[in-house]
Amino acid sequence: LRGNRRKYVLVEAFKDILPKRLHNRPKQGFDVPIGEWFKNELKDLYMSVMSEESLAETGILDPVSAREMYDLHLSGKRDLSKQLMSMFVLQWWLLRKGPGN
């Protein structure tokens, strides 16, 4: 931060490479296509972590509700990316740490 300019050092380091229009542009967020990944590239991993057996092992998430949400997401009827990601991360953590920890 220099004055009101954020990422001053980064912009200075790349000022000869970056177009001038980017030098003072406000910060921008970006979305990660996790919903698409759960349908494609990460589908096998998601299904393994969120399987009925895996969910029964940890006992926190309801397997029927979790599957219904995933099916709704796959069908395109609802974008449940954030909810699926939250459940996935929780379940992954529980599997690694154990539900009692």
Image (tube, helix red, strand yellow):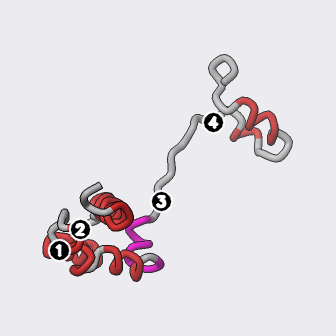
User: Which quarter of the rendered picture does the C terminus lie within?
Assistant: bottom left
Residue identifier under label 2: 58
Taking depth in this image into account, of 26 and 41 the one nearest to the observer is 41
User: Measured from the top left, where is residue 84 in percent x and y?
Assistant: 30, 64
Residue 40, magenta (yes or no): yes
Q: Is residue 72 left or right of residue 5?
A: left
Residue identifier under label 3: 32
Highlighted magenta segment, given as a residue range = 34-41
Label 1 element class: helix
Task: Pick whichever of labels 1 and 3 is earlier in the sequence.
Answer: 3
Work out whether residue 19 can be spotted: yes
Task: Pick whichever of labels 3 and 4 is earlier in the sequence.
Answer: 4
Q: Amino acid at mark 4?
A: Arg
Label 4 element class: loop
Alpha carbon separation for disc pair 4 and 1: 45 Å
Kindly report which numbered mark, 1 or 2, lies closer to the viewer in this rendering: 2
Choose top left, top right, bottom left or bottom right for residue 49: bottom left
Local crowd size for mark 2, using a 10 Å CA cut-off: few (<14), some (14–19), many (≥20): some
Give the answer, above or below, for where 4 lies relative to 86.
Answer: above
User: Measured from the top left, where is residue 63 in percent x and y?
Assistant: 17, 74
Give the answer, above or below, for where 46 lies relative to 20.
Answer: below
Work out whether residue 81 can be spotted: no
Task: Pick whichever of labels 4 and 2 is earlier in the sequence.
Answer: 4
How many numbered marks appear?
Answer: 4
Q: Is residue 44 left or right of residue 11?
A: left
Residue identifier under label 1: 63
